[in-house]
Image (spheres, rainbow, N blue to C red):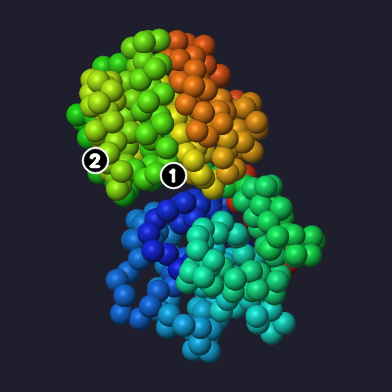
Amino acid sequence: MRVLHLIKSEGVYGAERILLYLALEQQRAGEAPYLGSIGAPGCAAPAIEALARAWQLPVLPLRVPRLPTPGAVRTLLAAAREVGADVLHSHGFKSNVLLGPLARDRRPPMLSTLHGWTAGAAWSRLALYEALDRWALRRIESVAVVTRAMLELPAVRALPAQRVRVIENGVPEPGQRAQLAQLTHAPLPESLLARMRERPTLLAIGRLSVEKGFDELIAAFAAARSAGPHQLLIVGEGPEEARLRQRVSALGLTEDVHLTGYVEGADRLLTHAAGLVMSSRTEGMPVVLLEAMQAGIPVIATAVGAIPQLLEQGRGGELVASGDRAALSEALRRLIGGAGSAPAGADLRARFSSARMAREYLDAYRAIT
């Protein structure tokens, strides 16, 4: 089956990584996926295009005006004809809004994955885009949501139930991700690997921003570090970096807590770690959590967003309430002391594999073609 994936990308984040993982699995299974990368005329090529090419996925750069126009619609439909697409797979509001209203006249049929909405202020530009997206979803043949909890969103509940299905995200096995990393990433810094070999290491990976709760994690680790020889590495960059470094120093943790800055292909560190810790105040469906589960390492995470569903209410890792520093510290103490919860089992890891995800999307495509 020929599938044209459509996305307007401004960076390689969770939705982009899931799209690429899905396309790779489809290619391995003998399908023919294409990346239709939407951008404005004259803009720099989005990063997803270079990554897709490095992974040997065919790319169609689609340059269309920023505002919806008939010409933009024609460009997308021409791309579908060019590759002989059997189905369009939309991964965002841009292609939803451009092609959704044409359901009665458009061929091929279309499936849209709802990766999540992130609007803040009610009158923001992003909120307007999401309102248009909700309108467009009502006119698309099939809609996939990535967690069961999203079925309760008002915009999803307004859709006919037979047109909505849950297809949870999935990631490749660690060996496959390592092979992909060799195509696109420089080797991991030897100094960082040497540090991780010196003593057991807990990892926290993410943007250094307030919603990630790294300030709470540092304080909780300070209370738990006496339970064993572990160290904590916080991998990422962001606006909270200076404040977090001050907190590490003030708590006397400079030998035990290290902020590494940005590390290219940071998920490769998971196989060297004693566990992953997520202290987020808010989350969607974090890809790094799926990658940690596939790596088979213990997980401690706050019960926000889709995390409780991913961890099956604690079967695949330890859940703590967001903002409960004492509970987070106690969970860290158990993990450091060797009494933490076991890593996700093989059945749970298989549930969140990219191969399973690709099979379920193929079923969804067949239902509308």
Q: Position of residue 173 (x, y in %)?
A: 49, 37
Seen at 51% across and 44% down, the residue is 282
- Residue 217 visible in the picture: yes
Residue at the spot of label 1: 211
The correct choice, above or below, for 13 with respect to 244 in the image is below
The correct choice, above or below, for 196 with respect to 207 in the image is above
Seen at 46% across and 21% down, the residue is 329
Q: Quadrant of the N terminus?
A: bottom right
Q: What is the three-letter code of the residue carrying label 2?
A: Ala
Q: Position of residue 166 (x, y in %)?
A: 69, 51
How many numbered marks are there?
A: 2
Q: Earlier in the sequence, mark 2 or mark 1?
A: 1
Seen at 31% across and 43% down, the residue is 240
Residue at the spot of label 2: 242
- Residue 36 visible in the picture: no
Q: Which of the 4 image quarters holds residue 161? A: bottom right
Between 218 and 233, the one lying in front of the other is 218
Residue sitting at the far bottom: 70
Label 1, residues with CA under 10 Å away: few <14, some 14-19, many ≥20: few
Q: Which of the 4 image quarters holds residue 192? A: top left
Mark 2 falls on what kind of element?
helix
The correct choice, above or below, for 240 with respect to 202 in the image is below
Q: Position of residue 41 (x, y in %)?
A: 35, 81
Residues tagged 2 and 1 counted as in contact (Cβ below 8 A): no
